[in-house]
Amino acid sequence: MFVNPIKRGSEILWTFFDVRVVDGMVNGSGHFVQWSSSVLRRIQTGYVQNYALSILVGIGAIIGYFLFM
């Protein structure tokens, strides 16, 4: 009388909450880290010229922001 409804309820909670919510958050954060590291890996080339160019572009964006705002 008590055991079977509790077992069914816990199975429903397990299939919905644990599998979809908890595992979804853990797997989603893993996929996000994998995606962001692949993007950052392409940006980090090791060439000083690329870093200098990005600094110059950033300085130009900041100066442009202050000049036109």
Image (cartoon, grey):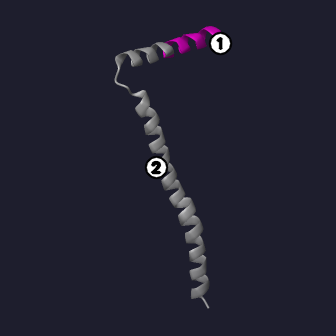
Mark 1 against mark 2, which lies toward the viewer? 2
Q: In this view, does 32 lie above or below 46?
A: below
Residue 22's tag is none
* In this picture, residue 66 sits left or right of residue 29: right
Q: How far apart are marks 1 and 2 (CA)?
A: 40 Å
Type of amino acid at the residue the image marks with label 1: Met
> Is residue 66 in the magenta section?
yes
Instruction: Write down the region rendered in magenta.
Output: 58-69
Type of amino acid at the residue the image marks with label 2: Gly
> How far across and how far down the image is residue 8, in percent?
60, 80
Decide which of 20, 13 is in the foreground and name it.
20
Q: In this view, does 11 lie above or below 43?
A: below
The C terminus lies in quadrant: top right
Task: Determine whether the residue tagged by mark 2 lies in a helix, strand or loop.
Answer: helix
Residue 69's tag is 1
Are the two marked residues, 1 and 2, in contact with CB atoms closer than 8 angstroms?
no
Q: Name the residue under label 2.
A: 30
